[in-house]
Image (cartoon, grey):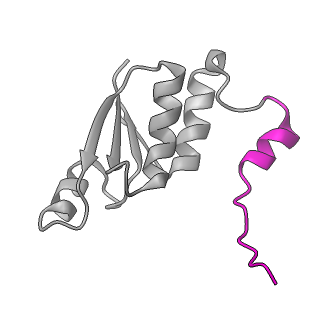
Amino acid sequence: MDLTLVIGKKNYFSWSLQPWLALKQSGIPFREVSISLYTETWGAEIIKYSPSGKVSALIDGKIMVRESMAIGEYLAGKFPHKHLWPTDPAARAETKVIPQFEPHA
């Protein structure tokens, strides 16, 4: 298995943390590339791995998957025995809903 996960620093970027947690908790082997964003070289560093200039990015050979939710879907399809995604379509749809912030009146 030759997966590489390119992320920002976990303590600042929760979207990077999501695919990292999925890989760690499921025991799927991967290489982590953590890029310190907002430095003089961060743009050049990201472009080495992610042509979009964005993290998170999962590299699987010639396949690149960007965005945390898409990475989750890709991993669930590639490793169905790890049960990363609900099998029920309605439950799976619910996992993709981003909660809306509703301020208290």
Name the spot of residue 46 as percent of width and height, x first: 25, 55
Which residue is outermost to the bottom? 105
Q: Is residue 7 left or right of residue 96?
A: left
Q: Quadrant of residue 78?
A: top right
Q: Quadrant of residue 51?
A: bottom left
Query: Which residue reaches farthest left?
Result: 40
Say whether residue 39 is left or right of residue 33. left
Residue that appears at 51% across and 44% down: 18
Q: Is residue 38 magenta?
A: no
**Residue 26 location (% of width, % of height):** 54, 22
Q: Is residue 23 left or right of residue 46?
A: right
**Residue at 80%, 48% in the rendered image:** 94
In the rendered image, the vertical position of residue 35 relative to residue 82, given as above or below: below
Q: Against 30, is 99 above or below?
A: below
- For image coordinates 52% across by 25% down, the residue present is 25
Foreground of the two, 32 or 58: 32
Picture coordinates of residue 80, whole percent (x, y):
65, 20
Count of number-bearing discs = 0
- State the residue lying farthest toward the front: 105
**In the image, residue 104 lies in the stretch drawn in magenta:** yes
Instruction: Name which residue lies at 37% across and 51% down.
Output: 11
Instruction: Decide: is 53 above or below 15.
Output: below
**Image quarter of the N terminus:** top left
**Residue in the foreground of this view, choosing between 104 and 25:** 104
Residue extent of the magenta highlight = 87-105
